[in-house]
């Protein structure tokens, strides 16, 4: 048990150190990025970037990747704005349900036909973007009743209604992945698919659940952001896929599948949100944010790769030393 806890703690160590170092550097060089305002700014990254990164991370844990999240968020934003007459909650439910349904369909096709998820989701990325342009008549969709978005503009200390919603989703999906049969199946097919199949783990169900959750998270993110902003443009969120993937990887989600938790995603999102909010407070261009994000991601990947290699070499040396210490076999 102690070894398991230590191993789990090590998986959080690097992203925690990166977050602390990033926060300290930005806070020490930016007067406006301090106190309650800085925490609020970072948490405001969770409703859009955080939810998309969370959905992407679940597909990565399952050994797949959903490339359609940006288009899904854009389509959901248009749907949420156009259905805002039913109220804030109703519009978000409709948009999220649509995303879950489309995601489940993607997962079913991937599982049934054995299609590579990258190939299929590239197609749906293009398809959903086209549907978004058609649904919006090729122009931004505007709220007709701006009181619908008022609850999303409320602030409760360091939280907003959007960030609270996102954090609740993080908590629920964290419990789902850790303590339910469906969550364990997602980890199983991502970590060792052949062994999972031999053990009787189905392929269809976890794949459907995985992509349904990814679609729902992206749709909820797009709906929240568009309703809060009061409009939805069909070209929105084109760069969201790369930012979400960067956040997941920065937090420690393994590209090899089967490893990582919701807390890893939250740490990665917090790092990117701190970078974005801190540089925005300094008046830096978006290109600087991309530059810093890329440098951080490369550094973290390099550190993890080096640590893994060194750990394997140390393990091999220990095993060799243990074999040498064994007494020679007694001749018969």
Image (cartoon, rainbow, N blue to C red):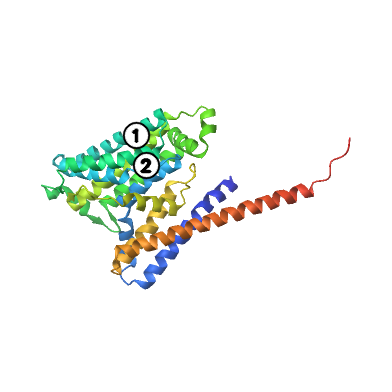
Mark 2 closeness class: few <14, some 14–19, many ≥20 residues within 10 Å: many
- The spot of residue 102 in percent (x, y) is 29, 35
- Between the residue at mark 2 and the residue at mark 1, the CA separation in whole angstroms equals 9 Å
Query: Which of the 4 image quadrants contains residue 65?
Result: top left
Find the residue positioned furthest to the left. 144
- The spot of residue 107 in percent (x, y) is 37, 33
For image coordinates 49% across by 36% down, the residue present is 188
- The spot of residue 243 in percent (x, y) is 35, 53
Q: Earlier in the sequence, mark 2 or mark 1?
A: 2
Given residues 284 and 114, the one toward you in this image is: 114
Given residues 155 and 190, the one toward you in this image is: 190
Mark 1 closeness class: few <14, some 14–19, many ≥20 residues within 10 Å: many
Q: Is residue 274 left or right of residue 98?
A: right
Query: Which of the 4 image quadrants contains residue 183?
Result: top left
Q: Residue 236 bears which disc, if any?
A: none
Q: Is residue 282 above or below residue 167?
A: below
For image coordinates 41% across by 36% down, the residue present is 116
Residues at marks 2 and 1 touching, judged by CB atoms closer than 8 Å: yes
- The spot of residue 149 in percent (x, y) is 18, 49
What residue is shown with label 1?
106
What residue is shown with label 2?
66
């Amino acid at each position: 048990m102690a070894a398991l806890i230590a191993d789990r703690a090590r998986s959080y160590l690097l992203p925690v150190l990166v977050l602390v170092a990033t926060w300290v550097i930005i806070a020490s060089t930016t007067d406006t990025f301090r106190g309650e305002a800085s925490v609020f700014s970072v948490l405001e990254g969770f409703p859009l970037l955080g939810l998309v990164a969370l959905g992407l991370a679940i597909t990565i844990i399952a050994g797949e990747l959903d490339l359609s999240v940006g288009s899904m968020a854009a389509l959901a934003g248009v749907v949420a704005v156009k259905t805002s007459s039913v109220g804030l909650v109703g519009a978000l439910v409709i948009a999220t349900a649509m995303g879950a349904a489309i995601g489940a369909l993607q997962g079913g096709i991937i599982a049934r036909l054995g299609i590579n998820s990258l190939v299929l989701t590239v197609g749906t990325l293009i398809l959903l973007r086209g549907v978004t342009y058609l649904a919006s008549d090729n122009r931004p969709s505007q709220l007709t009743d701006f009181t619908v978005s008022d609850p999303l503009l409320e602030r409760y200390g360091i939280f907003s209604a959007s960030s609270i919603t996102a954090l609740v989703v993080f908590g629920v999906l964290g419990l789902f992945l850790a303590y339910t049969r469906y969550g364990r199946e997602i980890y199983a097919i991502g970590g060792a698919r052949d062994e999972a199949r031999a053990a009787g783990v189905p392929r269809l169900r976890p794949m459907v659940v995985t992509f349904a959750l990814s679609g729902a998270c992206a749709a909820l993110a797009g709906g929240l952001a568009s309703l809060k902003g009061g409009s939805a443009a069909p070209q929105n969120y084109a760069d969201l896929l790369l930012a979400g993937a960067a956040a997941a990887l920065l937090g420690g989600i393994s590209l090899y599948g089967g490893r990582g938790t919701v807390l890893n995603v939250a740490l990665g999102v917090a790092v990117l949100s701190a970078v974005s909010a801190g540089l925005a407070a300094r008046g830096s261009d978006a290109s600087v944010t991309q530059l810093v994000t890329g440098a951080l991601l490369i550094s973290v990947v390099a550190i993890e790769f080096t640590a893994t290699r060194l750990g394997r070499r140390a393990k091999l040396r220990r095993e060799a030393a243990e074999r040498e210490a064994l007494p020679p076999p007694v001749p018969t």
